[in-house]
Structures are given as structure tokens and as C-alpha cells.
Image (tube, rainbow, N blue to C red):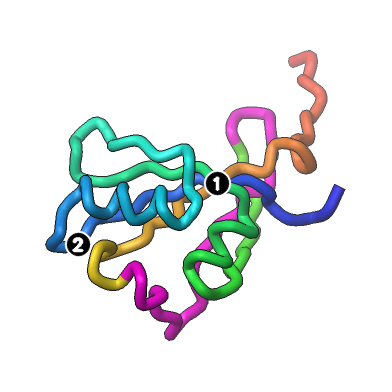
């Protein structure tokens, strides 16, 4: 298995043309799993990383950090566009912002520590 996140989830804040126009344009660019967030202000997209990078016009930057939840320690992967990058011209008029949430890398990094007997 390659050491990269293969399918990613991210959110898009639509520009002045609105949610429906942003969704239509994103579907036209190849994104299939698109749904509106509960508040109706953003679009949630799940797509293969290579499609996201191709459509957005640049490779995503990966930052990893350790996180602990109870006795489980995991590696958390933060994805983002490189500093100074701009959206491709076909998205600039319908997308105001792209948000990449933090994603846990569960497949490679869960380490359970033994419970103490005390």
C-alpha cells in the first residue's frame, strides 16, 4: 500500500453564484459524491486524491502528526493546497474556499498500548 491518503473528503464554500451552480460545475469536472452540509452553506465532496489534485490544479501538501484518544495513538493526516496556489480558472467564479478537514490514517497507525493492572 502506498503511503498516501487515496480517497479524501473536503468541503467547498460556494462563491457568489451559489450552491447549485458550484455543485453543477463540480459534477461536470468529474466529482460524483457531492452533498450539501446540514447547514446548507457548503458542499461536502468525497473523491479520489488524484482527481482532486487534477481538478484543483496542484498537488496537495500532507502534514502528519500524532494524536492520542484514550489508549489509542494514531497518526493524523492534514491535507491542504500549497501556499500561494490558486484555484483553476474554471472554479474561481463558483468556489470561494476549499476546506480540507483533518483525516485520521486508521489503516496504518493505530497502536494500542496494553492496559495496566492497577
58 displayed left or right of 5: left
Snapshot quadrant of residue 115: top right
Where is residue 75 shown, x and y percent of the image? Answer: 68, 48
| Pointer 1 residue | 47
Quadrant (top left/top right/bottom left/bottom right) for the C terminus:
top right
Residue under the image location 31 percent in, 49 percent down: 24
> Disc 2 to disc 1, how far (Cα)?
21 Å
Residue sticking out furthest to the right: 1
Q: Quadrant of residue 22?
A: bottom left
Q: Residue 7: x, y in percent?
A: 62, 45
Within-10-Å neighbours for mark 2: few <14, some 14–19, many 20+: some
Say if 22 sits above or below 32 in the image: below
- The disc placed on residue 15 is 2
Q: Position of residue 36 (x, y in %)?
A: 29, 37
Q: Residue at x 41, y 53 (%)?
A: 28
> The magenta stretch spans which residues?
69-91
Asked if labels 1 and 2 touch by Cβ distance under 8 angstroms, the answer is no
Task: Report whether 50 appears left or right of 43.
Answer: right
Residue 40 locus on image (x, y percent):
19, 37
Amino acid at each position: 500500500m502506498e503511503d498516501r491518503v487515496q480517497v479524501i473528503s473536503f468541503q467547498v464554500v460556494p462563491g457568489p453564484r451559489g450552491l447549485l451552480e458550484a455543485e453543477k460545475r463540480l459534477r461536470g469536472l468529474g466529482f460524483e459524491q457531492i452533498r450539501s452540509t446540514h447547514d446548507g452553506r457548503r458542499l461536502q465532496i468525497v473523491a479520489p486524491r488524484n482527481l482532486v489534485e487534477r481538478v484543483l490544479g496542484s498537488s496537495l501538501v500532507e502534514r502528519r502528526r500524532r494524536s492520542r484518544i484514550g489508549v489509542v495513538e494514531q497518526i493524523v493526516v492534514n491535507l491542504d493546497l500549497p501556499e500561494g496556489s490558486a484555484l483553476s480558472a474554471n472554479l474561481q467564479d463558483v468556489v470561494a474556499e476549499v476546506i480540507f478537514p483533518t483525516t485520521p490514517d486508521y489503516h496504518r497507525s493505530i497502536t494500542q498500548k496494553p492496559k495496566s493492572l492497577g
